[in-house]
Image (cartoon, coloured by chain):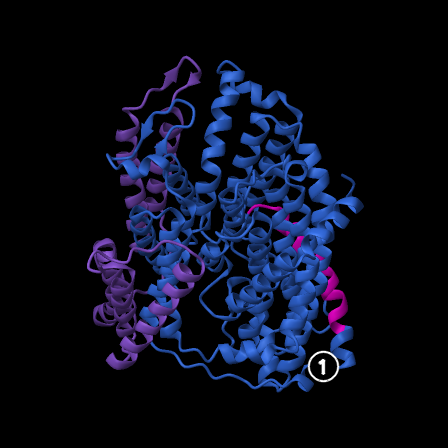
Chain colours: A purple, B blue
């Protein structure tokens, strides 16, 4: 079922990609245009996706719904923390957003609050010193700092 | 430049203090990446690319290459001691290695794995020198049609050898090719699939995709599994010496594994994994006592470990000689060469001899360093395994974020990495190997460019591709491979009487 879903998603992606590729020129004075290759790729996407959906591989049992929901909680927290990191990174800067994402990741593993905060602060400040102070790379400090 | 002269020049480059330090750092970090379950060579190299930004090109590539082949050494440590392969290529090592550890022989298993890796690594480097220089010279005759056919053949081989079914592998390749078309068309300057985002005009970089698919996806999987505590077997230095019988039994598996691994490394696909699997099967078939395999046969450690190490060397041949990557790890090395302003391909030996010969020579030095690191200092790496998994996962996330942002100082790259992390996690849940997507992303621009150049040269006549000896040879090999693959799959479906 899940494999069929994968195949269908690829086929739908192929159709959307094909629709966008239609707007590209197929021929130029210098030969084939920028739309030729995407058209071929769209064809492979639709065909391979349809085949994967039509004859999906056997997948292992997904397990009962409660255990699936429980097992997805940890990855869900980490993924949500990463999205929030992306939203606040430029404004809050590396130190604050880094501590946030690391603490959230540690909490997703059920680590204790003091441990999570301590490890996150040490790691983020340590990496800032190594990458910015020592190696001279650029990481945003955040608009809240003078 | 002759081979001997080139190697001498390479050693003069590699033996400078700066490059020696880069080599040491590379192999030490590579061993660490290999030892720690979860971070494979792909994510490891992607994570550590920012460290190379301030380095000269030669030192940077020496360090990244060191991480690549060093990770193969380290992978055996956790496989033997914990039954947890540090990276996929060490899966077969875990089968008999862990049994040996349970029988109180972890030391000899680790020692044979390290010595086998050293021998294989050295044989592999000789292979790069001999075959790589010849291939680079031969490839000077290649035009767009040959490169197009070669890259397409690479993708077809990859699909056939991937863990995925053929349909799923082709779907993954198509997704990779579709991603590779995002950005400005290099020939006409037309913007394609940018959806109004100016940041996408430069295209989608390989590094955020690899970091997402391998690094972030791995941490999401770790979060699903929750906290895990490792029970580690203690290893003392004096326990490392293998017995005479173990040494004798390991000799031919190491030699066979080295040559088999190198040859498989040349073929596009998951070379390190495939070579260790095939080496294990070969040793079991050749053994007079195959029933020992799976219960602590030292040959089951010696063969696969040698094979996966020489496969890393084999995989570097097309990268150095043709500028084509057929595996995610060599794609990372290729990306690093471009980041540091080195143009990979047949002319690299002439245009950047310091990088080419310096990296080759550093691999000899790196192999010796790895033997020293992985034998007397094995207890140091073993103690690193005590690092809690959740701290490791959180650190991987942090390093991924730093690595991707510092690449171009772009928020879009971080978004792409996070999105690819989600995709990578879903693919893991579906047990789909993401490597065809990565390789298609790397080869896509070359395939499109050479296809359009070929069609322009041939005035739209596809038969032009078939009139060239190299192209027709490659097409014949691919056709034979596909026919063999089809027959093997048919045979699997015929019920046994």
Q: Give the range drawn in magenta.
A: B249-268
Neighbourhood count class around disc 1 (C-alpha, 10 Å): few under 14, some 14–19, many 20 upward: some
Q: Residue at x 63, y 28 (%)?
A: B142
Which residue reaches farthest front? Answer: A146
Q: Where residue A47 appears, x then y in whole percent?
A: 36, 36
Relative horizontal placement of residue A71, taking residue B144 as reference (left or right): left
Circle 1 is placed at which residue position? B241
Q: Position of residue B188 (x, y in %)?
A: 39, 22
> Residue B486 versus residue B24: which sits nearer the camera?
B24
Q: Nearer the viewer, residue B107 or B99?
A: B107
Q: Mark 1 lies on which chain?
A: B
Q: Along the horizontal axis of the image, is B65 left or right of B402?
A: right
Quadrant of image for the C terminus of chain B: bottom right
Q: Quadrant of residue A83?
A: bottom left
Residue B92 visible in rendering: yes
Task: Determine the residue positioned at 74% across, 52% down.
Answer: B126
In the displayed structure, B36 sits above or below A33; it is below
Whether B202 is among the magenta residues is: no
Please tell me whether mark 1 sits on a helix, a strand or a loop. loop
Name the quarter where the N terminus of chain B is drawn: top right
Decide: is B260 above or below B188. below
Give the percent coordinates (x, y) of residue B482.
56, 40
Q: Is residue B278 visible in the rendered structure shown here?
A: no
B422 left or right, relative to B306:
left
Q: Quadrant of residue B26?
A: bottom right
Horizontal placement of A64 versus B493: left or right? left
Q: Is residue A24 above or below residue B169?
A: above
Residue B303: x and y, percent? 67, 65
Residue at the location (30% across, 65% down)? A62
Q: For the stretch drawn in magenta, what is the main secondary structure?
A: helix
The residue drawn where x is 47% and y is 84% is: B231
């Amino acid at each position: 079922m899940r494999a069929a879903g994968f195949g269908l998603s690829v086929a739908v992606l192929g159709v959307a990609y094909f629709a966008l590729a239609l707007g590209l020129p197929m021929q130029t004075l210098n030969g084939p245009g920028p739309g030729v290759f995407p058209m071929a790729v769209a064809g492979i996407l639709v065909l391979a996706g349809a085949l994967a959906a039509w004859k999906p591989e056997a997948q292992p049992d997904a397990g009962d719904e409660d255990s699936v929901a429980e097992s997805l909680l940890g990855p869900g927290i980490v993924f949500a923390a990463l999205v929030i990191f992306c939203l606040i990174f430029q404004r809050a800067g590396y130190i604050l957003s880094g501590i946030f994402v690391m603490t959230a990741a540690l909490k997703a593993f059920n680590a204790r609050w003091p441990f999570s905060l301590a490890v996150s602060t040490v790691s983020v400040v340590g990496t800032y010193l190594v990458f910015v102070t020592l190696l001279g790379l650029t990481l945003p400090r955040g608009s809240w700092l003078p | 430049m002759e081979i001997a002269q080139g190697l001498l020049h390479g050693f003069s480059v590699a033996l400078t203090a700066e490059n020696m330090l880069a080599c040491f750092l590379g192999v030490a970090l590579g061993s660490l990446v290999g030892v720690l379950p979860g971070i494979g060579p792909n994510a490891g190299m992607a994570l550590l690319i920012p460290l190379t930004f301030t380095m000269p090109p030669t030192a940077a590539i020496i360090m990244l290459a060191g991480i690549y082949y060093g990770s193969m050494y380290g992978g055996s440590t956790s496989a033997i001691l914990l039954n947890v392969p540090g990276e996929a290529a060490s899966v077969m090592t875990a089968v008999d290695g862990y049994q040996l550890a349970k029988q109180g022989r972890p030391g000899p298993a680790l020692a044979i794995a390290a010595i086998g890796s050293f021998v294989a690594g050295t044989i592999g480097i000789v292979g790069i020198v001999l075959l790589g220089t010849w291939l680079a010279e031969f490839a000077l005759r290649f035009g767009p049609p040959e490169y197009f056919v070669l890259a397409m053949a690479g993708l077809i081989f990859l699909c056939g050898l991937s863990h995925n079914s053929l349909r799923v592998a082709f779907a993954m390749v198509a997704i990779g090719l579709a991603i590779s078309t995002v950005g400005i068309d290099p020939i006409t300057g037309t913007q394609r699939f940018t959806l109004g985002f100016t940041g996408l005009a430069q295209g989608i970089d390989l590094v955020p995709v690899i970091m997402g698919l391998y690094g972030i996806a791995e941490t999401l999987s770790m979060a699903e599994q929750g906290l895990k505590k490792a029970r580690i077997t203690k290893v003392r230095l004096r326990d490392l010496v293998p017995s005479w019988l173990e040494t004798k039994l390991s000799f031919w598996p190491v030699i066979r594994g080295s040559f088999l691994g190198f040859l498989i490394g040349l073929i596009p696909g998951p070379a390190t994994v495939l070579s260790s699997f095939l080496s294990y099967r070969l040793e079991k078939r050749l053994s007079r006592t195959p029933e020992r395999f799976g219960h602590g046969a030292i040959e089951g450690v010696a063969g696969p470990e040698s094979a996966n190490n020489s496969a890393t060397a084999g995989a570097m041949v097309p990268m150095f000689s043709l500028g084509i990557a057929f595996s995610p790890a060599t794609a990372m090395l290729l990306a690093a060469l471009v980041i540091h302003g080195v143009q990979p391909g047949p002319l690299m030996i002439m245009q950047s001899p310091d990088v080419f010969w310096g990296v080759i020579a550093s691999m000899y030095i790196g192999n010796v360093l790895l033997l020293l690191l992985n034998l007397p200092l094995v207890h140091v790496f073993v103690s690193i395994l005590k690092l809690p998994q959740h701290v490791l996962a959180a650190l991987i996330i942090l390093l991924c974020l730093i690595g991707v942002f510092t690449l171009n100082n772009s928020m879009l790259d971080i978004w792409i990495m996070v999105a690819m992390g989600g995709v990578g996690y879903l693919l893991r849940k579906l047990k789909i190997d993401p490597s065809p997507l990565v390789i298609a992303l790397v080869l896509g621009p070359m395939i499109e460019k050479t296809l359009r150049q070929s069609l322009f040269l041939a005035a739209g006549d596809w038969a032009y591709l078939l009139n060239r000896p190299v192209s027709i040879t490659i097409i014949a090999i691919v056709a034979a491979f596909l026919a063999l693959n089809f027959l093997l799959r048919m045979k699997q479906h015929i019920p046994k009487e």
